[in-house]
Amino acid sequence: MEPKKNPQANVGRNSSLYFAIGLALMLFLTNYAINYKTYDKVEIDIGQLDLEEIEDEEIPITEQLQTPPPPPPPPAAPEVIEIVEDEVEIEETVIESTEVDQETEIVEVEEVEVAEIEEDIDVPFSVIENVPVFPGCEKGSNTQKRDCMSKKISQFVNKKFNTELASDLGLSGRQRINVIFKIDKTGTVTGIRARAPHPGLEKEAKRVIGLLPQMKPGKQRGKPVNVPYSLPIIFQVQD
């Protein structure tokens, strides 16, 4: 028995192909429908330009002011030369020549003596070449003379200074007086200055330093010089 259908007319054999084509078509239509946009038409009034209402603007004509040219300069006055008579007689000064010839006598010039100006130079006591010499400190080296002088001055001040003056002035405790003076080129004590807690102590310190004996002056490079000297005076006031 033969089948009634033609095997070539079987629709089901290409169903998968048709399904894929249909699915692709539906996806395309769906995407187009989603992305489709519409816009509302809005009437925009841009107005109308009426050229008849614009009138021609009249531009005024400006006139240029013409300034008159400057007047010509006046003619120059003629020079008048006045002739002045010479009433004053001028004596001519004759300039003598300073040139010397062979017949001119040459005067010998005597020797010119240059006077040395002595300067007051202050040399510190710690660096002077030859220290001032206190009476009784003539022997020994420069260092020994320096130590001897410091010792002698301290002993002299301790002996002559009135230590009871501080208690009379109402001071108590430890008192310090700074004294500065110079031993000049002649060995004399000059320029005494003192600083203390009370003017009375300063006055007493100046009095005692002024009693120092004459000394042999200090020397620098063999010449007498001024030597500054500082002396602290410290004592305790007994209550």
Image: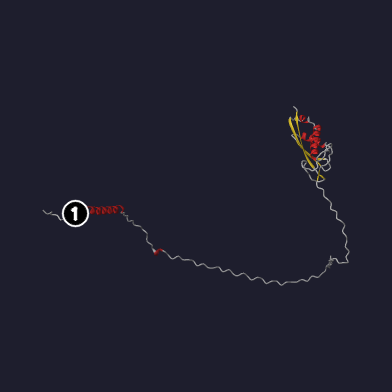
Image-quadrant location for residue 10: bottom left
Given residues 143 and 224, the one toward you in this image is: 143
Q: Of all residues shown, which one is farthest toward the left?
A: 1
Residue 150 drawn above or below residue 111:
above
Colour scheme: secondary structure
Q: Judge from the rendering whether residue 239 lies leftward or rightward of residue 39; answer left or right.
A: right
Q: Judge from the rendering whether residue 233 lies leftward or rightward of residue 63; answer left or right.
A: right
Given residues 48 and 144, the one toward you in this image is: 144
Residue 13 drawn above or below residue 194:
below
Q: Of all residues shown, which one is farthest toward the front?
A: 1
Given residues 221 and 57, the one toward you in this image is: 221
Residue 116 drawn at (x, y percent)? 83, 50
Tell me which residue sits at (20%, 53%) in the image: 13
Residue that label 1 marks: 11
Tell me which residue sits at (16%, 55%) in the image: 7
Residue 216 drawn at (x, y percent)? 84, 40
Q: Judge from the rendering whether residue 29 lies leftward or rightward of residue 135; answer left or right.
A: left
Image-quadrant location for residue 76: bottom right
Q: Secondary structure at mark 1?
A: helix
Q: Of all residues shown, which one is farthest toward the top?
A: 239
Tell me which residue sits at (19%, 54%) in the image: 11
Residue 219 drawn above or below residue 69:
above
Q: Residues within 10 Å of mark 1 (few under 14, many from 20)?
A: few
Residue 118 drawn at (x, y percent)? 82, 48
Given residues 93 and 201, the one toward you in this image is: 201
How many marks overall? 1
Q: Quadrant of the C terminus?
A: top right
Amino acid found under the numbered disc labelled 1: Val
Residue 58 drawn at (x, y percent)? 46, 66
